[in-house]
Each structure stands twice: as C-alpha cells, then as structure tokens.
Image (cartoon, rainbow, N blue to C red):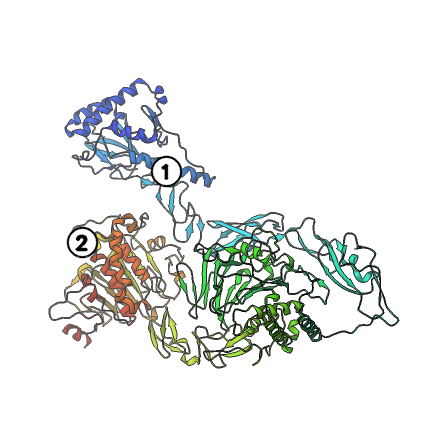
C-alpha cells in the first residue's frame, strides 16, 4: 500500500483547554475502571522508570509549548512513555494493550456470533465500559519527535510509541473508517507519515458492530445497529414491513412475539396434534411460516381429556367430553340405557333430568278415579350410570281400573291457558307459588326447564345469547333469568377468562332516574379501552385519546347502526353486542367461546345451575353475592350506596288490585297467538312469574306494562336467534306497539344492515331484526331518512353537498348520491426535491436521502435530469463562506438537463444557484431562451422560479436556491426512472435501480443512481440522529415556526394536501439549520403552498408569514396565482 503524507501543520500543538498532565488523565481512567495494582508486580523496573519519566515530560509539554526539547529528550530514551495503552485488553497488529503501569483492565474478548443473545448482553456491558473509558480520556497529542512537531489526535483514539515509531488505535468495538483498528506512523522529513493506510490524517474512531449489521443497517454506536424501516432486530436481521402485523393465531393459544419470531403456547389443558404445548411461527420472505410443518398456519391447540373420551365421544374442552346421545359419564363410558326409566317396571308419569353422572326422576301416578298406588311415591329417584339401578327401591306401581292408562294430550296453547287458570285460581284463594317448587331465590328462574317435559342438559357447544334489559333483568347464556340491582355501578357483563382478549363492562343507569335513561358500555379489546355512550340521543364511540365516527371498523372490530340499535361485532372471537342505546344489551356468543367466559352472562357451558359463579370461581346461592363479585371498582364511590341491597321482587309485596292487573296483562301478552311457536322454547310457568314480577315492580309507574314488553322483546330476539321465524311480528296496536320517529317505519323482520349515505351497500336480509327502519327508496343520514339524491359526500373528514365538485389532479369529482363520481383522464405528475434531504416521487412516495454527489433525478430514453447535491450549508448560502461538510444534510446545488436536439446536437442545460443558466458551458445572459426549432424554452415564470419547458410537455422548475420540481405529462407514464421513481401509480416499485432490482430503503436505491462513481463525500453517510434530537435546544422554536403548516392560514388546503409530512420535514430542516431559521422553514412552507396552488387552492400564506414575504422589483406586485405566460417583451417575441 503506498505511503501517504499526513497534512499536519508544524505549529499544531496541544490546545489550551487541555488541562492536567498525562498522570492526571491516567488517574481519571483508573477512577473509572478501578485500580488493580496487583498486576504491577509483573512489570519490570525499566518500564516503571520510563513511565515515571514520561509523566514529567508529558506534563511539561502540556503546560508549555517551549518545553518540546525536554519532551524530545524523553522520547529518545523510551518513546513508549508518550501515550495510553488500551484499558480493554484488545488490540491488533501484535500490540500489547492489556495493561499500563500500575493498573490492569478487565479482559474482554469478542462475542461469539453463534450465541446472539449472549453477545448482545455482553456487548452492552463492553459498550458501557468503552464509553466510560472514553469519557475519562481528555484530548491528547502525538509527541514531537525529531523534526516532527507534536500533533493533536482525535479525542477517541489511543496511541503507543516504541522503537522510533508510533501506533494509533481505537478502543474495542470502534475502528477507523476503513475498518482497521491500528495505524502505524513514522516521522520522515519533518512530517508524520501513515505507513499502512491511505489516510492523509488520523481520522476519528467510528463505532463498529460485531457481528456486522445486516440488510443495510448502519452501526451508529458500538454494538448498536440502526435498521432500515423494513428491518428490525439487534443486527437488522429480521424483515418486518412485508409480513402481516400479526401472525395466524392457533385456537386456544396465547402468542408472544419478539421481532419476527412468535411463540404460540397452548392454554392449560390443550396440546398440539404432536403432543407439544408450544410451537414457533416465523416471518420468512414476507410470509408467516410454522417452523415445524412449513405451512402458513400452525395447527390449532386441541383440548385434552384424561382418561380419553370413548364411545365416539369428543374432547371439547379440558377434561370435558361431549358424548353422543346414547352415552354418559366423564369420558362417555356409560350407556344411557343403564338408567332408562322406561325400561323399569314403573308404569306412571315421570319427569326426568339428566347429567353426566346420573338420572333424576320425579314419579307420579295420574289423578284418575279408582287408581291405586302400590308402594311409596318418594320425592325423587336417582340412578347412577355406573350402577344402573334407581334408588330408593323398590319403585312404586300405578294400578289402574280396567281400561285405565289413556290420557288426553293438550296443545301448547292449552297448556299455557291451564297454567294461567291455575294462577288465577291461586289469586282468588290468596295463595301464591306452590311450596314444592325449588329455586335459588325468589327472583331467579330456569328459563329453558319446564315442568311438563323430560329435561336433558345439553353440553355440546352451540351459539347462545345473553341479555340484560329494564335496568335489572339478566338472562344468561344457559337460560337462567335473575333480577339484580345493577345501578349505579359498573359490572363485568362478559369477559374472556382464558387470555383476556375482551372484557365488556356495563355501567347501569342510576336507579331512580327518569325511565328510559341509558346504560353505557366499556369494551377492553386488545388492551385498548373503547367507550360507548348515549349523549343526548347521539351515540359516541371513543378511546382515551381518540373519538371515532360510526360506522367504524378498527382493530378487527366492526361498529355499525342496525335498526336504531348499535351492533359491535368482534369478528375475530365470534362475539356480537347489540345495544338499543338505552337499557337493552344483547350479547351473542359463537361456539368458539364455549366454556371460556364469565361475568353476569354466566359460564356458557350448557348448565344453567352453575351460572351464579363468581369471579373467584365459586358457585353461590344468592344473586346479590354473584353480581357483587363482578362489580368493577369505581374510584368515585358512587355505587357504594346500593351495592349490598338485595332486590325484593316478591309477588306478595304487590297489592291485591295491582296483582290482579298483572295476571290480566300477562294473560293477554303470553297467550299471544303470534308467539305460540316461540313459547315452546321456554319454561312458561317461569315466564308467567317473571311477567307478574315485572309488572308489579316496574319503574315506569304510569305504564307498568312497558316492562313486560321489554321482556317479551328480549324473548322474541331469543326466538329469532334460535331460528324461530317471526316474519309477521308479534306486536300489534294493542300489544306493545312501537312508535318510530325521524321518518322510520316499524318492520318486524328488518335487514341486518341498512343502506346509508356513508355506505352504498344494499340492505342484507340474512337475519331478521325487529325495529324501526327507513322506508323503501330512502337511506340513513344521521338520524333521518332521505332519498339517495340528497346524500352529501365526505373527503378527509369534510362534508360536501350534493353536486359539489372537487379537483383531483387533472380530474374533477362530483358528489352524486353520496358517492364521488370522477372523470377518468390520464394525468401528469410532479416529482420534487425540497429542503434538506426530502424527495417525493411521481407516484407520491416520500423519502429522505442525504447523499452528497450528482444523481439522476430523472432518466428517460432521451432526456436526463441530474441534480448536484452538496451539504446544505453550501447549497443554501454559499456566500456565507461555509465550507461543505459530510456531517450536514444535503441540498440541491444545481440541476443539469441533458438531451439531443432534433438536429443531432447534444445539449446540456445547467441551472445553477442564483438562477444562472449555461447551455453547453456557455452562460446565457438573457432570458427567455429558445433552443432548437422551438424544442426547448428556458424562461423566468416569476421572481421565484425559472423553468425549462420541452415541447413534449415535460417541465423542470428551479428556484435558484435548492428547490427543484419536475412536471411530467401523461405520455411519460411507465417511461421514467431515477430518484423520481417509475410513474406508474405504484409506489411499491419506485425504488427501481438501473439493474432492474427494487431496493427496500432509500440509501442503497439513491446511491445506485449516482452519475459519477466517485464523489467528494460518501454517497451513503452514516445515519445520524434526527436534528431535533441532536439539537434539543432548537426543537421548541422549530415547532413554533413549523406550526404554520397546520394552522388556519392553510386550513382550506388541509383536506386536499396532507400537512403532516411537510410539518415533519420542516422540523428536520429547522433543527438542522445553521442560518437564520426563515431560510430553512420558508422553503418548506413555500413547497406546501405551491402544492396547494397546484390543486387549485389559493391560501395567501405569505401575507401572514412576514418572514417569508417576497420583495418584488419596481413596478411589480406579488401574486400567489399569477399568469406564468408572457411576462416580458422577449416572452412575446418567442411566441411569434
């Protein structure tokens, strides 16, 4: 390697701000790293003496430049006395840098690449030790030697001199720019010469990363890689931007992710098909891949049952077997016929219920004249499947007279009327509920269990609905109805008890307030709190930081209005919430939630008997204890006053007159012929009791039957949910009529989703929904129903009246029927480079690039546009005599257009700072200038911009400072390349390189469009912190100046041109600015204003921002939207 001379001034000495001798600097290092003097015993005496002499020599040299002779003398005896050895025990080139004098550093070796996590942990410790050492070191100098003067070295390098030569080295995890760690210097001819490098002077040490950063990551600190946007990980080894935001999640699992690798762990009691309980999902080449199978989605976690289910039973949950109709038992091991009452000798009436262990039957003999009962009729008979025998034994027998045993079969309606007659008779006798009925409390009922049919609890997963209405009624998924005092507290309505995916909280309307007040809902969904409230008749949806319009679709949740209800659909987990804006809330759960939920809605496992299970997992006997366990803590304490009050909905508390009215009303409602099919699903006797309770205790004292209507409405929804069609409705003018407003009409079976101005979707009819709907031929708009022709349109949050027009590039969009109808012309596009490093392609992709070289901004088959980028201090204001620096952001200094005229003449037009123009290296003194046969026109279009216009429609704009725009006509589509991208309306391929590859980050892409192979500055500079991070003292003023972009002066433009990116660009430029602030923020404001004007929006912003005002020449006035044609007599001449 050729030897290079260091460009070192002979007068270069230690700066005056270096305080302390070499010993003092050494002491600082020892204080930082600790002094382990035990190692000094191994040092020979000569080393000690040389160290001592070097201390005095260095001290005298530091204090007085005239003492160089003494320094030289010392160095002649032992040059190693001038400098510091590395305290980190790591060096190259055979140099021992492990100890110095009386202290020895910890030995820190390089981490092994095979153990990434260990390397990272160790690397962090080493990096901190290195930083601590560097902080302890002050500036230092290479000593004078012979005819070579002393030289100040960069602050973060170390040196060692011995045997008439010096070696300069970097600390561990740092290196010189060429990747080496040691430079060898020798004094020849009065100059220091670097023998093993091409460096002209000793450069600062740069951070290094080992293993090296991958995928164009930049090592910005020792052991720390700064990754491109689409890569992550300690070494930028994980591609992240092209994979889905979340991997496919196996059912019944919990997924945790680190970088682009996720672990899917099965819930307790679940396993993967191979028997494992954990598996990996990794992002590979843009796709989530199950590492074991190589498939796109891992298998689901299946429940485990021990012992295994037999007799074709299916394991549906942890240790829960779903048995076929003929088998029972924990794992379906018993045949149901073992306890079949019909296969016994009993010959009377029976009412049986079944579970997985035994059959319970109540036996009676018919009340027939002359019938004799042989034996005793016990209250209950039980038979365990494991034993196959009913107890107590023996079973009784019913002995009939001749011809006995024939009974009359009643219809469902006749049975209802018989029950009603029974309670009328009880009322006349001043009696009430029969003592033989057993319930958990007088305010709870088993909705699906009747006294007239055999009962079999069904544990198979199925969809179910839970509901709360009237402010105090709740029906669980498994059919248990209870009344509870919920107000004014918040209670958990339903919660995912396995992995906490969702948590729905109901805040009840304060009790005693006006009838018809509204509940509110809170929904924790993926750890974010969503709140739904009825605010003066308008439904609001918001999080702690944002308010959402309705309908909305966010994070896999759909929120939409349906028949004056609000439907919240958590599609991913199979849960829907139906809210009528007031006191009805219905929760529909799919089978995938079977056995994994809790709350006021119960356990969803097919067994109503365990629905009163508390948050702690204990089944209690009182409703109050149950609901209180699911109460959500209220910091305000507003619910403490009623939280221990048990509701006393006892029919005995209802006076005689009102009780008679209740029986009469309930007879009329429940005997409704339209509900006959629906009532077959329910325990009619329980409904009757609930109906009378509701009437007697309704808060609406003037119309207590309204509470009954709420209950019937809930039951009708239940019937519809279970497939019973009520196409003609159950209401009429006498039974619970509904009054609709805002032009709506009542439909007993309306669509799921209505057409609205916001959505052009046709109404769906897959499900039947009762409620008020817009009449045929109309659509929803806010609270009203209007014809589609009256629907307004929206764009970026702004509403436009019908027939309003807006400009969209070269097309015009008209508001028709609530939708935008746009013309379809082929439009041109603009590419631009503004400010420090900010680019926008023809297709709208924005990126930053700080390369300092000449690049092809546009390249076509016959025209190229080259931009010369230099450090911004030189580009914006060369007359400030600020020399370019590789540490500054880059700006455009000049623009060169190359093309061949029709005459065959190669032509180069250069637009330089100050609006100087040269054509083929000849300066053009007067504009406008026409080239060729009217092929190209160069002219000033305003006092701010000049343009180069081609007769094929291409136009290049230059502001004479650093802004350049290129307007391409439609015929350039798919014909462009370079920094401006591909112009095909696809931003994904804008980073197309000359080789035909598509880069993923701006740096490598732009670097491949260099015009020259070599540049004065590196085309890929190290990534530096954001200027506002590097200069925090400038941030507040930058935010003040840049706020102009988002304020009222540009308000009319905000909905057309997004201001956020311009605001971010402005912050970057102002924080990096080395001139007056207006020289950095005015170009960004001007760029935003220009784009607004291009969209046809005049803002007049320069009148408000005085610092950016334009001073016009004599006789001219400033016009933001002036005519760029024919400004001068010369302009007119060019048109002839």
In the image, which is nearer the foreground, mark 2 or mark 1?
1
Query: What is the secondary structure assignment of the residue under circle 1?
Result: helix
* Whole-percent x, y for residue 898 in the image: 26, 62
Q: Residue furthest right?
A: 402
Pick the quarter of the image with the C terminus. bottom left
Q: What residue is shown with label 2?
A: 878
- Looking at the image, residue 489 sits to the left or right of residue 975; the answer is right
The one of 223 and 1135 positioned closer to us in this rendering? 223
Q: Residue at x 82, y 55 (%)?
A: 393
- Looking at the image, residue 759 sits to the left or right of residue 290; the answer is left
Q: Is residue 175 visible?
A: yes
Q: Residue at x 87, y 72 (%)?
A: 403
Circle 1 residues within 10 Å: few <14, some 14–19, many ≥20: many
Query: What is the secondary structure assignment of the residue under circle 2?
Result: helix
Q: What residue is shown with label 1?
A: 127
* Whole-percent x, y for residue 984 in the image: 38, 66
The one of 673 and 808 positioned closer to us in this rendering? 673
* Whole-percent x, y for residue 515 in the image: 49, 70
The one of 203 and 949 positioned closer to us in this rendering? 203
Pick the quarter of the image with the N terminus. top left
The one of 866 and 1039 positioned closer to us in this rendering? 1039
* Whole-percent x, y for residue 812 in the image: 35, 76
- Tally the marks: 2
Circle 2 residues within 10 Å: few <14, some 14–19, many ≥20: some
- Structural distance between the alpha carbons of marks 2 and 1: 40 Å
| Displayed quadrant of residue 1002 | bottom left
Q: Is residue 898 visible?
A: no
Ranked by sequence position, the earlier of labels 2 and 1 is: 1
| Displayed quadrant of residue 1093 | bottom left
| Displayed quadrant of residue 552 | bottom left
């Amino acid at each position: 390697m050729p030897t290079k001379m260091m460009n070192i001034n002979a007068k270069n000495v230690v700066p005056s701000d270096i305080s302390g001798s070499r010993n003092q600097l050494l002491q600082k290092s020892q204080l930082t790293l600790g002094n382990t003097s035990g190692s000094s015993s191994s040092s020979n005496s000569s080393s000690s003496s040389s160290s001592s002499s070097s201390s005095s020599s260095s001290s005298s040299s530091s204090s007085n430049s005239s003492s160089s002779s003494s320094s030289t003398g010392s160095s002649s005896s032992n040059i190693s006395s001038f400098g510091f050895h590395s305290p980190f025990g790591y060096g190259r080139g055979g140099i021992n840098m492990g100890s110095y004098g009386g202290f020895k550093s910890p030995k820190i070796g390089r981490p092994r690449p095979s153990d990434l996590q260990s390397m990272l942990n160790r690397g962090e410790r080493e990096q901190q030790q290195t930083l601590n050492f560097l902080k302890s070191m002050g500036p230092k100098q290479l000593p004078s030697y012979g005819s070579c003067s002393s030289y100040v070295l960069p602050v973060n390098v170390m040196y060692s001199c011995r045997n008439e030569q010096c070696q300069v080295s970097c600390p561990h995890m740092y290196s010189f720019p060429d990747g080496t760690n040691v430079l060898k210097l020798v004094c020849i001819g009065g100059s220091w010469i670097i023998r093993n490098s091409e460096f002209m002077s000793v450069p600062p040490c740069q951070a290094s990363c080992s293993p090296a950063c991958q995928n164009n990551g930049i090592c910005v600190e020792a052991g720390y890689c700064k990754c491109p946007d689409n890569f992550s990980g300690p070494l930028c080894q994980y591609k992240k931007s092209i994979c889905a935001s979340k991997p496919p999640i196996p059912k019944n699992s919990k997924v945790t992710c680190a970088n682009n690798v996720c672990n899917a762990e099965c819930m307790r009691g679940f396993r993967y098909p191979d028997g494992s309980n954990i598996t990996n999902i990794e992002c590979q080449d843009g796709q989530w891949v199950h590492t074991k199978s190589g498939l796109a989605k891992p298998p689901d976690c299946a429940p485990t049952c021990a012992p295994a289910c037999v007799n074709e039973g299916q394991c549906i949950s942890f240790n829960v077997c779903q048995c076929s109709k003929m088998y029972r038992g924990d794992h379906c091991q018993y045949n149901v016929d073992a306890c079949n009452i019909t296969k016994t000798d009993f010959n009377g009436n029976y009412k049986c219920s079944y579970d997985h262990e035994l059959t319970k039957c109540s036996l009676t003999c018919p009340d027939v004249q002359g019938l004799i009962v042989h034996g005793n009729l016990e209250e209950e008979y039980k038979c365990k499947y494991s034993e196959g025998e009913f107890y107590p034994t023996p079973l009784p027998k019913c002995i009939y007279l001749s011809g006995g045993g024939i009974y009359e079969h009643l219809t469902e309606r006749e049975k209802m009327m018989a029950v009603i007659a029974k309670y009328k008779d009880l009322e006349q006798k001043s009696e009430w509920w029969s003592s033989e009925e057993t319930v958990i409390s007088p305010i709870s009922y088993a909705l699906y269990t009747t006294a007239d049919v055999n009962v079999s609890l069904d544990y198979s997963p199925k969809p179910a609905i839970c509901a709360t209405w009237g402010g105090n009624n709740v029906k669980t998924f498994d059919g248990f109805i209870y009344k509870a005092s919920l107000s004014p507290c918040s209670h958990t309505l339903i919660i995912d008890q396995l992995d906490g995916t969702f948590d729905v909280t109901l805040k009840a309307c304060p009790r005693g307030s006006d009838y018809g007040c509204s509940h509110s809902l809170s929904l924790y969904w993926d750890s974010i709190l969503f709140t739904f409230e009825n605010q003066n008749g308008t439904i609001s949806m918001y999080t702690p930081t944002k308010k959402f319009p309705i309908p909305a679709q966010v994070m896999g949740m759909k929120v939409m209005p349906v028949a004056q209800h609000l439907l919240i659909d958590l599609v991913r987990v199979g849960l829907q919430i139906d809210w009528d804006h007031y006191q009805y809330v219905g929760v529909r759960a799919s089978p995938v939630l079977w056995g994994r939920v809790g709350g006021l809605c119960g356990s969803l496992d097919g067994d109503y008997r365990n629905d009163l299970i508390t948050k702690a997992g204990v089944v209690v006997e009182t409703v109050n204890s149950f609901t209180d366990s699911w109460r959500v803590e209220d910091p305000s304490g507003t619910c403490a006053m009623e939280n221990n009050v048990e509701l006393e909905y006892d029919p005995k508390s209802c006076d005689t007159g009102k009780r008679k009215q209740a029986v009469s009303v309930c007879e009329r409602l429940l005997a409704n012929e339209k509900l006959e099919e629906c009532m077959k699903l329910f325990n009619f006797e329980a409904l009757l009791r609930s109906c009378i309770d509701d009437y007697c205790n309704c808060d609406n004292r003037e119309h207590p039957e309204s509470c009954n209507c709420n209950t019937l409405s809930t039951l009708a929804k239940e019937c519809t949910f279970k497939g019973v069609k009520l196409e003609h409705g159950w209401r009429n003018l006498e039974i619970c009529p509904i009054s609709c407003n805002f032009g709506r009409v009542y439909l007993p079976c309306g669509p799921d989703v209505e057409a609205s101005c916001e959505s052009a979707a046709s109404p769906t009819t897959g499900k039947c929904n009762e409620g008020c709907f817009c009449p045929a031929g109309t659509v929803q708009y806010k609270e009203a129903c209007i014809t589609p022709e009256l629907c307004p349109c929206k764009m970026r949050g702004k509403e436009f009246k019908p027939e309003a027009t807006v400009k969209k590039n070269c097309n015009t969009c008209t508001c028709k029927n609530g939708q935008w109808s746009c013309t379809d012309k082929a439009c041109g596009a603009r590419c631009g480079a503004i400010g420090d490093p900010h680019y926008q392609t023809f297709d709208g992709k924005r990126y930053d690039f700080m390369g300092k070289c000449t690049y092809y901004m546009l390249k076509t088959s016959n025209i190229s546009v080259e931009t010369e980028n230099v450090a911004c201090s030189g580009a914006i204001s060369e007359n400030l005599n600020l020399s370019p620096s590789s540490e500054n952001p880059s700006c455009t200094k000049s623009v060169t257009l190359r093309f061949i005229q029709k005459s065959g003449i190669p032509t180069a037009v250069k637009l330089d700072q100050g609006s100087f123009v040269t054509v083929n290296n000849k300066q053009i003194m007067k504009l406008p200038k026409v080239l060729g046969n009217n092929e190209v026109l160069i002219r000033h279009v305003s006092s701010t911009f000049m343009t180069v216009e081609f007769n094929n429609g291409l136009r290049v704009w230059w502001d004479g400072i650093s802004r350049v725009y290129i307007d391409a006509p439609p015929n350039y589509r798919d014909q462009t390349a370079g920094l401006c991208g591909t112009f095909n309306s696809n931003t994904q391929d804008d980073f197309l390189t000359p080789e035909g590859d598509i880069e993923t980050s701006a740096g490598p892409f732009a670097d491949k469009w260099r015009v020259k192979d070599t540049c004065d500055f590196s085309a890929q500079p190290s990534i530096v912190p954001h200027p506002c991070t590097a200069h925090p003292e400038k941030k507040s003023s930058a935010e003040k100046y840049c706020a102009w972009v988002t304020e009222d002066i540009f308000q009319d433009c905000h909905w057309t041109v997004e201001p956020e990116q311009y605001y971010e660009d402005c912050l970057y430029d102002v924080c990096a600015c080395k001139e007056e602030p207006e020289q950095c923020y005015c170009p960004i404001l001007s760029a935003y204003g220009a784009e607004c004007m291009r969209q046809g929006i005049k803002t007049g912003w320069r009148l408000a921002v005085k610092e950016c005002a334009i001073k016009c020449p004599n006789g001219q006035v400033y016009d933001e939207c002036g005519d760029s044609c024919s400004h001068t007599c010369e302009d007119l001449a060019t048109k002839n």
